[in-house]
Amino acid sequence: MTFERALATALREAGVAASPAALAAMRGHYELLSKWGRRINLTTVLDPVAAARRHYGEAAFLHGELPQAASVVDVGSGAGFPGIPFAILRPETHVTLVESSHKKAAFLMEAAHRIPNARVCPVRLQDWDGSADWALLRAVSPASVLGDLQGRVGNVAILGTRRPPPGPFAPWRGRPLPWGRSLRLWTASGPASSGDVPRETSAGR
């Protein structure tokens, strides 16, 4: 199966409709990812079908579940997930990709050059001087960053298998992804936020 067909399937399973321009932008990012992946280790998931669901489908599900926001920060963005597809699907939202690895940040800068509402900050989260409505986490340990996000973001969304630890963001609400795995979308608000986050389903308890 081609990446284009796999992507269309993944987006349909996530319940998200994408414009032709958005589909083309995600295909362009995947092609760039495949090219760079021959030189540096950005991700181990490059098979078209697996990448469409694991990378782009999960980001699309995140986009479909979160409320509108003026700004988000993707912490430890790596190859641009979930931040790049999220930015493509939400052109009205300013997306910051925080990545401390110089090689990965170089890739992100080339990828973000094609996405007007995305910018790259090649720093550790502790050195990021911005703020955002939402923080997105996927391949980052929540315990290692939630303290640094306190006071900088109003809400946090995490793609992970385990309920995040208690702390400055609570209560955690869990929602299973549509692909029947143990992975869930966890969301919570900070103490100063209104808490406009998706409700927890019984499957996420």
Image (cartoon, rainbow, N blue to C red):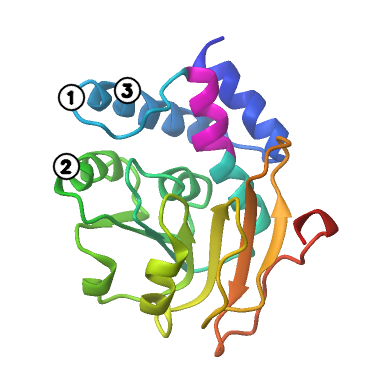
Secondary structure state at the residue bearing disc 1: loop
Q: Please tell me whether residue 70 belongs to the stretch shown in magenta.
A: no
Could you tell me residue 28's position as x and y percent?
37, 27
Type of amino acid at the residue the image marks with label 1: Arg
Which residue is nearer to you in this view: 79 or 164?
Answer: 164
Q: Residue 157, which numbered label?
A: none
Which residue is pictured at 66% across the width and 38% down the height? 17
Which residue is pictured at 65% across the width and 79% down the height? 195
Of callouts 3 and 1, the N-terminal one: 3
Residue 108 lies, with reference to residue 47, above or below; the image says below
Could you tell me residue 93's position as x and y percent?
47, 60
The image quarter containing residue 157 is bottom right
Type of amino acid at the residue the image marks with label 3: Ser
Mark 1 lies on residue? 39
Which residue is pictured at 53% across the width and 68% down the height? 156
The residues bearing labels 3 and 1 have C-alpha atoms spaced at a distance of 9 Å
Q: Over which residues does the magenta segment extend?
A: 48-57
Within 10 angstroms of label 3, few (less than 14), some, or many (20 or more) residues? some
Of callouts 2 and 3, the N-terminal one: 3
The image quarter containing residue 37 is top left
Mark 3 lies on residue? 34
Q: Residue 103, which numbered label?
A: 2
- Check if mark 2's residue and mark 3's residue have beta carbons within 8 Å: no
Residue 35 lies, with reference to residue 186, above or below; the image says above
